[in-house]
Amino acid sequence: MVKVGGLTSKFYRETKGLKVSGGQSVKAGTLLTREGHKWQPGLNVTGKMHLVAVCDGEVHFTKKKNKYNKQITIINIRPVEEK
């Protein structure tokens, strides 16, 4: 039996997670993460489960503990200065 279209559960796990690295430049609308509670939106980032860049800029991360004393990573975008 052949499955047509869509993702199987085996390959769906591979699509989740962080899509960019620190210091990487991104454009507005770029998907930064998929499905994770480890990452929270910071400056110029929107979304809850899927984080998306609001403006063009450079990605940088900060770490912080939440109210349950668990470490989370906050994803921020440093906007590009226009000349």
Image: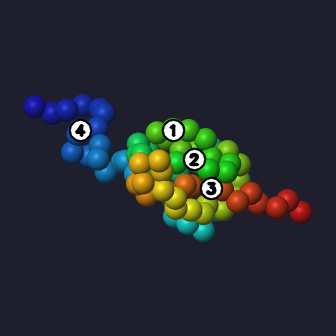
Q: What residue type is labelled 3?
A: Asn
- Report, in whole angstroms, how far the alpha carbon at label 4 lies from the one at label 1: 24 Å
- Report, in whole angstroms, how far the alpha carbon at label 1 lies from the one at label 3: 14 Å
Q: What residue type is labelled 2?
A: Pro
Q: What residue type is labelled 1?
A: Lys
Where in the figure is residue 20, as x and y percent of width and height? 51, 59
Q: Mark 2 points at which residue?
A: 41
Q: Name the residue under label 3.
A: 76
Q: Callout 4: helix, strand or loop?
A: loop
Q: Which residue is drawn at 10% across and 31% down?
A: 1
Q: Callout 1: helix, strand or loop?
A: loop
| 2 on left or right of 68 | left
Q: Which of 82 and 48 is in front in this view?
A: 48
Whether residue 79 is visible, yes or no, is yes
Where in the figure is residue 10, as x and y percent of width and height? 21, 45
Q: Nearer the viewer, residue 65 or 5?
A: 65
| 54 on left or right of 49 | right
Which colour style is shown? rainbow
- Report, in whole angstroms, how far the alpha carbon at label 2 lies from the one at label 3: 7 Å
